[in-house]
Image: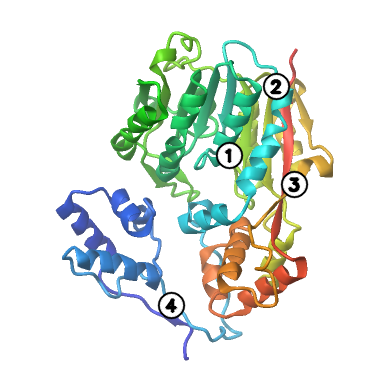
């Protein structure tokens, strides 16, 4: 084949999607979920993202089934990479700064369904519950990146086992509408098992979410505060009422990309408060009130709260230090991030030998947070723990017979996806790597060498002194 890139010009796919949404009266996020299982699909196209030929084929087939003419070569089509290598004179291009690894829905869903990270992280967080000394009126927990609430719901179950009669107050920060929907879908059972629960979900920033209070005046005046008292006594009734929140979420949980950082930011701040109507009296002092919400958390969960490649100062100033300030006396913040130095990173370095995404250790984070807190640091303890306590492993699920002389393609693709997802490799370089079979060969060799695939995370603790 000749040439490395095929140009992509033509009519706009966005125009065709907008026409479909206008004719059928559906939101763009709904279109994305129906067609490619990604509610942010259209928003990303508007921000300049490109589509692969496979995605374009799915979108076009959907449009044509509904009577619309679909563009064959729209300008949103990603340029096709040829299998032949680039000429030596071709200069490599820098990765797009707009790429955010946790926004890629398909990679994320495949990763969480094939690896045990969520379960292992929840067990590590559970180790901290024995150190908590809650104070009335409730045990207070803040989840700094709720995601689809797989970790949070497991922690909630463990908390119910340890504190079966104590009121719980949970605040979860999440900007993704899809993840909020998935999270709320898990909560009906939690309200049934532990009735004395107040759950708050918000899309605010790290420096705002613990206190449920936007800092900017313009954001504060546009704040949407919605309180839902769930009636009934069964998980089915609670589930029906939570499902009925879909129009509210679709209307208010909107996000856009920051032109400066490329990160998603809220269009307007939202606070959603849920509790059981029949426990309103008991929870009167736990339910937050607009403008009067208290932080004072007993436990703050900060699992993968920042990009690995983000500057150390950003991690300390914008993420961990504000969360530490939200702790109550005796409260504990557990931070968890990827460590590298595992077979997953070995796969990545077989393709990109100089790759080093995990440049800040837990020790670096704690030193930077201590410096950011300044004189306030006297009020906290900083514990990096020893390697056996701080570092833990999670695995990719495989059958005993899968890692053999002949490893199936599906297993290789799942392992490759997990490795590049954890290492946060950008789409541009991935597109070049999958143009040849070297990535599959590298994955196969590492799996055979180690008899499977696993990854290492590391954790650290910041606790506020009781006095």
Q: Nearer the viewer, mark 3 or mark 4?
A: 3
Q: Is residue 87 above or below residue 77?
A: below
**Mark 1 vs 2, N-terminal side:** 2
Question: In the rendering, at what x and y percent does residue 94 appear?
Answer: 56, 66
Q: Are marks 2 and 4 in contact (CB under 8 Å)?
A: no
Q: Residues within 10 Å of mark 2 (few under 14, many from 20)?
A: few
Task: Provide the residue designation for mark 2.
Answer: 132
Q: Secondary structure at mark 1?
A: helix
- CA separation, marks 3 and 1? 16 Å
Q: Residues within 10 Å of mark 1 (few under 14, many from 20)?
A: many
**Mark 3 vs 1, N-terminal side:** 1
- CA separation, marks 3 and 4? 40 Å
Residue at 80% in and 40% down = 389
Q: Is residue 6 above or below residue 209?
A: below
Q: Are marks 1 and 2 in contact (CB under 8 Å)?
A: no
Whether residue 379 is visible to the viewer of this picture, yes or no, is yes
Question: In the rendering, at what x and y percent does residue 330 appear?
Answer: 71, 19
Task: Provide the residue designation for mark 1.
Answer: 151
**Mark 4 vs 1, N-terminal side:** 4
- CA separation, marks 1 and 2? 18 Å
Task: Provide the residue designation for mark 4.
Answer: 80
Q: Secondary structure at mark 4?
A: strand
Question: In the rendering, at what x and y percent does residue 133 appear?
Answer: 70, 17
Please name whichever residue, 421 or 275, is drawn nearer the observer in this view of the structure: 275
Q: Secondary structure at mark 3?
A: strand
Q: Are marks 4 and 1 in contact (CB under 8 Å)?
A: no
**Mark 3 vs 2, N-terminal side:** 2
- CA separation, marks 3 and 2? 22 Å
Task: Provide the residue designation for mark 3.
Answer: 392
């Amino acid at each position: 084949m000749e040439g490395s890139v095929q140009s992509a010009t033509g009519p706009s796919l966005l125009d065709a999607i907008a026409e479909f949404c206008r004719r059928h009266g559906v939101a763009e996020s709904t279109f994305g979920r129906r067609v490619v299982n990604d509610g942010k699909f259209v928003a990303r196209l508007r921000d300049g993202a490109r589509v692969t030929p496979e995605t374009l084929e799915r979108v076009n087939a959907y449009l044509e089934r509904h009577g619309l003419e679909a563009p064959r070569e729209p300008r949103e089509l990603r340029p096709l990479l040829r299998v032949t290598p680039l000429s030596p004179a071709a200069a490599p291009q820098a990765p797009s700064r707009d790429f955010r690894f946790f926004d890629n829905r398909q990679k994320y869903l495949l990763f969480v369904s094939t690896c045990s990270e969520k379960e292992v992280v929840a067990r590590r967080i559970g180790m901290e519950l024995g150190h908590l000394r809650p104070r009335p009126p409730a045990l207070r927990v803040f989840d700094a990146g709720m995601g689809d609430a797989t970790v949070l719901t497991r922690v909630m179950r463990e908390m119910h086992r340890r504190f079966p009669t104590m009121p719980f107050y949970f605040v979860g920060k999440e900007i993704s509408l899809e993840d909020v929907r998935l999270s709320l879908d898990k909560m009906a059972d939690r309200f049934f098992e532990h009735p004395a629960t107040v759950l708050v979900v918000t899309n605010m920033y790290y420096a705002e979410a613990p206190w449920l209070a936007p800092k900017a005046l313009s954001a504060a005046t546009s704040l949407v505060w919605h309180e839902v008292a769930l009636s009934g006594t069964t998980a089915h009734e609670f589930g029906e009422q939570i499902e009925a929140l879909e129009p509210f979420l679709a209307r208010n949980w909107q996000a856009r990309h920051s032109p400066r950082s490329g990160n998603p930011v809220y269009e307007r701040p939202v606070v959603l408060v849920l509790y059981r109507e029949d426990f309103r009296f008991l929870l009167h002092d736990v339910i937050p009130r607009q403008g009067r919400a208290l932080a004072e958390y007993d436990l703050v969960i900060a699992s993968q709260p920042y990009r690995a490649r983000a500057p150390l100062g950003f991690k300390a100033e914008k993420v961990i230090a504000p969360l530490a300030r939200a702790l109550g006396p005796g409260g504990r913040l557990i931070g968890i991030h990827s460590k590298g130095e595992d077979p997953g990173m070995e796969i990545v370095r077989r393709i990109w030998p100089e790759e080093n995404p995990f440049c800040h250790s837990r020790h670096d984070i704690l030193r930077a947070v201590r410096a950011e807190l300044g004189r306030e640091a006297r009020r906290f303890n900083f514990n990096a723990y020893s390697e056996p306590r701080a570092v833990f492993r999670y695995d990719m699920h495989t059958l005993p017979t899968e890692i053999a002389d002949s490893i199936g393609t599906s297993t290789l693709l799942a392992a490759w996806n997990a490795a590049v997802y954890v290492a946060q490799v950008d789409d541009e370089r991935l597109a070049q790597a999958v143009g040849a079979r070297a990535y599959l060969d590298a994955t196969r060799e590492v799996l055979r060498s180690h008899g499977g695939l696993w990854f290492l995370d590391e954790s650290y603790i910041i606790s506020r002194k009781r006095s």
